[in-house]
Image (spheres, helix red, strand yellow):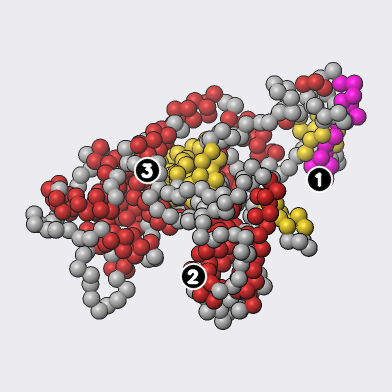
Amino acid sequence: MFAHLYPSGTGRPSIPASRIASVMVLQTLEGLSDREALDQVRYNLRWKLALGLDLEDRGVDPSVLTYWRNRIKNSTTPTLIFDLARELINETKILNHHTKRILDSTVLVDAVITQDTMTQIVAQIKRVRKLIPALASVPLSDEIDYSRTKPAIDYADEDRINETLSILVRDAKTLIDRARALGYLGDDEDQTSDSPLGDQQLGALGLLGVVAHQDVELVDEERGAYRLTRGVAKDRVISTVDPESRHVHKSRKNYSDGYKGHIAIDADTEIITSATLTKGNASDAEVAKELLELEHESVRVYGDSGYSSMDLSRHLAEKSHSEVIKPRPLTMAVPDGYSVDDFVVTEATNDTPARVTCPAGHTVMISAKGRASFTKYCGTCPLRDRCTRSKRGRVMTFGPNHAYGRAQRERWGTEETQTAYRAIRPGIERIHAQMKRKLNGSKLRYRGIAKNTMHYLLLGTVWNLKVLLRNNLTR
């Protein structure tokens, strides 16, 4: 099981990988730090029995856990422990003849503090100068005290903020331009073939370019003046300490920073069949394909509106899976007014183009670009107040997802579908809650997707082992 973790044939470390993997599982079960876990190995008789250790075994140093996490993370099998537990589950045959899979994601808070724009630029300029000695002597503006975490200015003065921001962006550009002049970067800020920079140094330069431009817009090119951009960048880096963490919106009101944990469970046994971790802004529907990748038989997939996607629906059909997925709520131009489903669409034929009929009975053609305009009828229409707020009248656009969305809402409208969804889908929420509360999984311990994915999969492993024990599968 662990031979591939030993690439050298000259010897074997004195600590078996299987024992360290077992310590990681017990550590996750009890929500302990590395030092606390190794104290349990040294003093707790139950741990010694579980690990097969002698009574006087003094354990190992806590740094060994860090070493082995990195070793597994960098191997060809970063999901090793979860995969071993999955093999055990398959041997028990507990999943045989169970074909209901529930998909869901949950927000996991990251282990770093979210930084504002200036803090990020200052921190990354200091890091680049530390990692690349040739850039440490590049002169920067003497108006910025880089010994501080953040410039000491009046943050109620917008002009002063933009002036300081402009200086920081210019200093960042100075470092990047100097790195390019030294042959460290190509024109597109990628590493050149003969660049002496390592991955860490190149990554630091790349991150500097990102944080120096993601929140700013150029005001005056001649003076090099910038200002803060209104709004938030689509894939905004929120911290230079953990560049892979992101803003997470599970709903319009539910907002946090961190990652998303995704799981697929069997509805009957509550076994986690697959799990992964992504950036906080990842699409649930895209991750669903990965969660179902190991399903070699047809299954019935249950999911909330986050999984409502024409692309996912086609993928499930190709794999012979069926779906019970809640459609996205319709947006209406007028509250409690007419939605797109109140308009009757007639598909195109050889003789006639596609048409759409409004609730008042007016019919118009749908253009080649999917546009249908009722403006010539809306002026005297008695139903106008329930249909549109536009002064011109109702104009609709029918995209490629329209037919899929309408068909999905029609399926969802049946009592049988909604009853099955309400009976099965909520079960996964309890598993998320117990993984967070009982296994201390609500906040991640590490930085970066790779290490946090290992931690999240360990949570899933512990949950699955508890389910096996609950079902008396002890051998």
Q: Which of the two marks, 2 or 1, is nearer to us in this view? A: 2
Where is residue 76 drawn, in percent x and y? Answer: 39, 65
Q: CA distance from mark 3 to mark 2?
A: 34 Å
Residue furthest to the bottom in view is 194
Residue that badge 2 annotates = 131
Identify the mark at residue 369; answer none if there is no mark: 1
- The image shows a total of numbered marks equal to 3
Which sits in the foreground, 234 or 391? Answer: 234
What SS does tag 1 mark? loop
Is residue 188 visible in the rendered structure shown here?
yes
The image quadrant where one finds the N terminus is bottom left
Q: Which of the two marks, 3 or 2, is nearer to us in this view? A: 2
Q: Which residue is painted at 56% across and 79% down in the image?
A: 195
Where is residue 36 drawn, in percent x and y? Answer: 24, 50
Q: Which residue is painted at 78% across and 63% down in the image?
A: 222
Quarter-wise, where is residue 398 in the image?
A: top right
Q: CA distance from mark 1 to mark 3?
A: 48 Å
Q: Residues within 10 Å of mark 1 (few under 14, many from 20)?
A: few
Residue that badge 3 annotates = 441
- In the picture, measured across the screen, residue 150 lies left or right of residue 359, that is left
Three-letter code for the amino acid on which mark 3 is drawn = Gly
Q: Which residues are magenta?
A: 366-381
Which sits in the foreground, 449 or 330? Answer: 449
Q: Which residue is painted at 59% across and 27% down in the image?
A: 413
Q: CA distance from mark 2 to mark 1?
A: 53 Å
Asked if 200 appears above or below 107 in the picture, the reply is below
